[in-house]
Amino acid sequence: MSEQPTTSREVESKLRVPAKFVLPNLVGKKTGIARAKQQVTRKLHANYYDTDDFRLYRWGVTLRRREGGPDAGWHAKLPVVDGDMMGARDELHVPLDAGEPGNVPQALSSIVVPFTRGAPLVHVAELRTERIPFSLFDEQGVEFAELVDDSVSIYSDGQVIDSFREIEIEAMVEGADLAPIVDALTTLGAVPSTSSKAGAAFGPAATAPPDVPPPVEVGPRDPAADAITAFMRKYVRAFIIQDVRVRRDLPDAVHQMRVAARRLRSGLKAFGPVIDKQWASALRTELGWAAGQLGAARDTEVLLERLDKGARDLGSKDAAAVQAVIDPQLNSRLADAREDALESLNTQRHLALLDALVDGANNPRLTNLADQRCKDVFPELVDRSFRRLDRQVKRLRLEGPADDWHEARITAKRARYSAEAVSGVFGAPASRLANAISEVTEVLGEHQDACVAQDVLRELASTEGIDGQTGFALGLLHEHEFEEEIHYRLEFQRVWPGVQRCHKRTKLV
């Protein structure tokens, strides 16, 4: 089993300076530096890896193997904010011996698969740096930042092909204010850098946008094709970024990746007349598979949290009996579901889906209707989604089967996602409608969770070895979830008229 990377949050500012730049004495109240201590000069040797077309760097990611200094090892740096090269980044680190030069450790390469999508990682640059570090202390004697003065040489085939000098200021404590230091240096001629050291070495090829560019703004008079492209790019980017986060086991990543898949599926369905039917159907099938692979983990996680909360409300004696059954069973299911979800991300089917999504974000297959203006195409499609929901709601009965309410929830989500998908085109009216429908989806989501909880509780109660006291406690919790189910049906009836009024008032033009 490969060694798992450690993660640290990096917040730094970079500035380029001339070779003969004289580093000033920065100690003073304006900079917040009470004392600066020069440390031992370091010799750093870094080799960078990427695909031939710099897929990682174009997404804001750098991957290197660096020798020298206290943090020698393999590093992958990922922006905390989508595509932000110069802001906060998470640095993932594994030791040097995790992989020889040219052999990127699996612990890092597996995390960036959504960006590389099977393209090999190759050596793309070699940098050697002479680093003079300074520890910066505040008035309380706390080292709040580190400033390093780097003289960098770029090598190719053993020869220096370029060099530059750079100053980095990195926060050493959370919330450290680096701006006064940066201002003091820029006043003396330092220039805030728009590129990392790696970017300087990679050259113009690395300055291209990522293979899924950020969406552009689209207005009501623009072609519908532009809005579909913007929609695809927005949620394909979200899907890919959350895929990386799932591989890192970050909070809420599974949920957000699943949401991105669902929104893509709903958009491909709602905008059917504008999109090639066969292409959309094939992509929706694969997105449904991906969402399903993630669903068991997310649903079990939500269910475990819900039942534990309900158990605690029963009182200490019954809570202990219930949790002694619920927690081992559902935690075991959760572990299996997470393992299955991660395994699915490493299948050829998932890689093929990533390729299809990237292709679709750049070249969606559209019908002739996509040449018409957004204002002439989308209002009717959004309205059609809502009318479908309205018809579904008319069939609901307070004492009707749970399946009818579940179908209404699915239809409501599609209507909500349809309105959200065009909110960038039509602005506030579409956003208001989407927000109104979201009240319905939240209520129906709680209703569905209560129904699922009842099924699971019945299953657990029938488990071999359940004694009378535990069975009684599980029954109490089942009764609570049944009451929750009815409560949310009544709550739906309360909020639905307001959603209808919002729809009637909404004019997308």
Image (tube, rainbow, N blue to C red):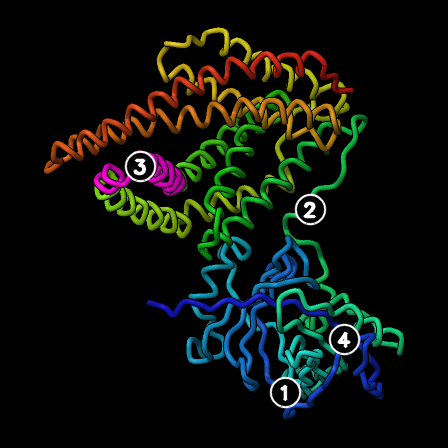
Residue type, label 3 = Ala
Mark 2 residue crowding within 10 angstroms, few (<14) / some (14–19) / many (20+) = some
Quadrant where the N terminus sits is bottom left
Q: Is residue 353 left or right of residue 482?
A: right
Q: Report, in whole angstroms, how far the alpha carbon at label 1 lies from the one at label 3.
A: 67 Å
Q: Which residue is mark 2?
A: 214
Q: Is residue 350 left or right of residue 478?
A: right
Q: Report, in whole angstroms, how far the alpha carbon at label 4 lies from the one at label 2.
A: 38 Å
Q: Is residue 341 above or below residue 477?
A: below
Mark 3 residue crowding within 10 angstroms, few (<14) / some (14–19) / many (20+) = many
Q: Is residue 312 visible?
A: yes
The residue stretch that appears in magenta? 296-321
Q: State the count of labels.
A: 4
Say which element carries label 3: helix
Q: Is residue 423 left or right of residue 316?
A: right
User: In the rendering, at what x and y percent does residue 386 appear?
Assistant: 59, 16
Q: Which residue is mark 3?
A: 311
Say which element carries label 1: loop
Look at the magenta stretch and give its main secondary structure.
Answer: helix
Q: Report, in whole angstroms, how far the alpha carbon at label 1 lies from the one at label 2.
A: 38 Å
Residue type, label 2 = Pro
Q: Report, in whole angstroms, how far the alpha carbon at label 4 lies from the one at label 3.
A: 52 Å
User: Considering only order in the chain, which callout, 2 or 1, is on the residue closer to the N terminus?
Assistant: 1
Q: Which residue is mark 1?
A: 158
User: In the rendering, at what x and y percent does residue 193 appear?
Assistant: 77, 69
Looking at the rendered structure, which numbered label has been put on residue 32?
Answer: 4
At 55% across and 42% down in the image, what residue appears?
357
Tag 1 and tag 2, C-beta contact below 8 Å: no
Mark 4 residue crowding within 10 angstroms, few (<14) / some (14–19) / many (20+) = some
Q: Nearer the viewer, residue 365 or 196?
A: 196
